[in-house]
Image (cartoon, helix red, strand yellow):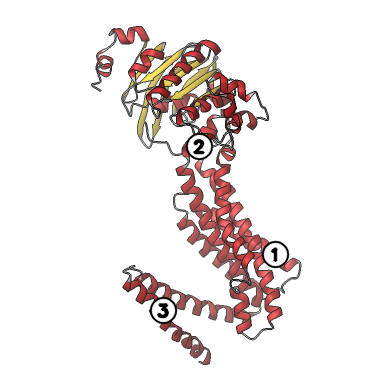
Amino acid sequence: MQDLGTVASALLALSLVAAAIAVSRYQRLDLERDIATAVVRSFIQLTAIGYAIDLIFGLENLGYVILLLAGMTAFASWTSAARGEGVARAFPISVAAIGTAAATTLGVLLLLQVVPPTARYLIPLGGMVIGNSMNTASLTLGRIRDDVKAHRLSIEAALALGATSRQAVSPILKTALRSAMTPLIDGTKTTGIIFLPGAMAGMIIGGADPLEAVRLQIVVLYMLLGSVSIAAILVGLLSYRCFFTPRHQLRTAPPES
Amino acid sequence: MRISDIRYTVAQAEILKGVTAMIGEGEVFSIVGPSGAGKSTLLRTINRLAEPTAGEIFLDGTPTREINPLELRRRVGMVFQLPALFGETVADAVLYGLRLVGRSTDVKRLLELVGLDAALASRDPQSLSVGQQQRASIARALALEPEVLLMDEPTSALDRAAQQRIEDLIGDLGAQLNLTIVIVSHALDQVERLADRVLLLVSGRLEGEWSKEDFFSGKVGEQAQQFIAGEL
């Protein structure tokens, strides 16, 4: 029961949430419900995953690790697909993008023996890869959908000059990929100066050697850069097609002038 | 060019209900009708930016369905209501279509052809007036040396002076390049100045096709008379 007590002690940090609620009330932001949902969900989800990881650590079977990561990928894809509403096949596109990003980056780390093939490494690293890829996939999907809608005229002008769908949409793909990847690139550039990344902060607080924490953090950053790029590019290349017919026509008809 | 019983249905709405027409080489062919009649859609089925649900369009006797859409669009150019130029310079914008197939041409000659100062070639397209941009977009379509030029309300976003200059240009192009021009316009005075033949669409249905002289002389049906009188 001691670990339950540890978890409960985290609840003391709840007093800080009061500040958020106070601001919301004071400024009438109407965010109290959202904050409450976020607090309750994060508590339940983190506690549950804590027990799940603990259980899997005990099982010492890589199959369960893969199963857990697959489940996380499915949930992340579902979240992304919801953000990409209006894009046909948003869910399979997200699964392909997030799944490939996670499998490739974790695979490379294992292959190069940067991290050992144990649940202790694979689950937290996998979670970071999947989470970041999910954010990128959501941003890219939403951006492409909105930009295709906003730039119909330019797209059709390009098509009318004999451009393929891919050529016509390429400026939009570029902007979408750029805006999805920039936050992480900027974060990576300023890391260590402006903020200590989560994994490293956690390890230092947990009593690990700061240099070992740095080593792992560098692995994490490069892994995230790789996975986010893979997710963004796959989402871009897979999703633009659903706005066009095979005959290089934009799908939805414009309003009659 | 022959348009044969073209139908276009989207989301159960029948936008075009069987339109047939003959468009002669070197002709300025005008599509008119009340708003929502399907004029733009008809134009877009010609270069297959919109895929007809049924019917056939023949270009030099070949069904356009059998021509690669990318090649078709190089042979049938299009100018839109708004110019939508892309690229860093006017030259980039004008050469866009040609560069897609790895070709280039003399931009200055093209700019002069549409009545623009050749010195504009190195300018940012967005720094031009809308009228100048529209002329650059015509140059961009002409760069591919199309057989047919589709124009969708090309002057409706322009002021009167710019409108006049584009109209003069359209008249000149027809004569100089023996270019077949299909133009959608809602301004009947413009149709009267430019067109050789006129096709009237009402609610997606073909009401008739006339020479300009017949159309404006009143030798037309009741619907057309009502349309000319502005009652549709």
What secondary structure is found at the residue carrying circle 1? helix
Q: Is residue A80 visible?
A: yes
| 3D distance between C-alphas at marks 3 and 1 | 39 Å
Q: Nearer the viewer, residue A9 or A30?
A: A30
Residue A129: x and y in percent read 60, 66
Residue B176: x and y in percent read 54, 11
Labels 3, 2: one chain: yes
Labels 3, 1: one chain: yes
Question: Does the residue at mark 3 contact the one at mark 2 (Cβ under 8 Å)?
Answer: no
User: On what subunit does the disc labeled 1 rest?
Assistant: A
Instruction: Kindly identify the residue that appears in the image at 60 percent across and 62 percent down.
Output: A186
B222 left or right of A137?
A: left
Q: Nearer the viewer, mark 3 or mark 1?
A: 3
What secondary structure is found at the residue carrying circle 3? helix
A234 left or right of A107?
A: left
Type of residue at label 3?
Answer: Val
Q: Nearer the viewer, residue B95 or B73?
A: B95
Residue matched to label 3? A17
Type of residue at label 1?
Answer: Gly
Q: Is residue B75 visible?
A: no
Instruction: Kindly identify the residue that appears in the image at 34 percent across and 25 percent down.
Output: B204
Instruction: Kindly identify the residue that appears in the image at 58 percent across and 73 percent down.
Output: A195
Question: Hey, which residue is sitting farthest bottom in the picture?
Answer: A2
Residue matched to label 1? A107
Question: Hey, which residue is sitting farthest right in the picture?
Answer: A112
Q: Residues within 10 Å of mark 1 (few under 14, many from 20)?
A: few
Residue B82: x and y in percent read 45, 32
B65 left or right of A103?
A: left
Mark positioned earlier in the residue sequence (3 or 1): 3
Identify the mark at residue A154; answer none if there is no mark.
Answer: 2
Question: Does the residue at mark 1 contact the one at mark 2 (Cβ under 8 Å)?
Answer: no
Quick check: B87 above or below B67?
A: below
